[in-house]
Amino acid sequence: GPRIGVVALQGDVEEHVTYLERAGADVRPVRVPGDLEGLGGLVLPGGESTAIGRLMERAGLLDALRERVRSGDMAFFGTCAGMILLAREVAGGEPPRLGCMDLAVERNAYGRQVDSFEVDLTVPALGEVPLRAVFIRAPVVRAVGPKVEVLAVWQGRPVLVRQGRCLASAFHPELAGDLRVARLFLDMVAA
Ligand code: GLN
């Protein structure tokens, strides 16, 4: 299968490894720039975006990845904290990040009373069956740029977005286990 890396510094790494393997990917943990060799795609997991961003910066991964964003030879998928690390603009505490998607997000903005929740999303790009989505202290997407494709919304806010070879979700597809989001990403890797 396609060779995919998962940034393995903090967060729900194992869940992503299992999720992508079930979708047929050959999955490698990524901790240092050398681990990026031969990868077609990279997942930035959920977790704590400030911690992940700082560790990525310290490991030299942010610099190494900026080159790959420019060259376009790798696809990226960020979930929750990972979405924050891909967003150009972040409110509520700015982590070091890639910032390669034209998104403005606000961290932890669904409110304390609803720290985590599950909903069924309509995602036309994935077919008619609703997609179960688990949100955990998720970022709210406040604005998207003109090149961003909104693939799903919940309560009027984009929650699954794509821009070129970058995919991001405010929720955790790896926790609900529906493989359609992983397959969508693997298609982007192959494209
Ligand atoms: N609240 C976390 C952050 O701001 C993201 C939570 C998650 O990834 N589930 O980084």
Image (cartoon, rainbow, N blue to C red):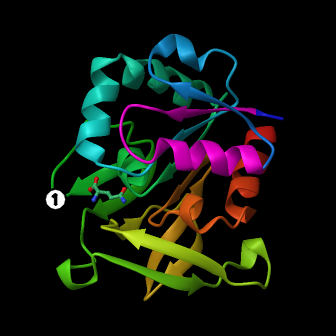
Evaluate whether residue 165 shows in this view. no
Q: Return the residue nearer the eye: 16 or 41.
A: 16
Q: Is residue 14 magenta?
A: yes
Considering every residue shown, the one lying at the far left of the view is 93
Evaluate whether residue 101 shows in this view. yes
Describe residue 32's horizontal placement relative to residue 21 as left or right. Answer: left
Question: What range of the chain is rendered magenta?
Answer: 3-22
Q: Amino acid at mark 1?
A: Gly
Image spot of residue 161 (x, y percent)? 55, 63
Image spot of residue 140 (x, y percent)? 33, 70
Image spot of residue 148 (x, y percent)? 54, 60
Mark 1 C-beta closer than 8 Å to ligand 1: yes
- In which quadrant is the C terminus drawn? top right
Q: Is residue 20 magenta?
A: yes
Residue hosting label 1: 92
The residue carrying pointer 1 sits among few (fewer than 14), some (14 to 19) or many (20 or more) residues within 10 Å by Cα, namely few
Residue at 69%, 54% in the rendered image: 182
Residue at 74%, 64% in the rendered image: 180
- How many badges with numbers are in the image? 1
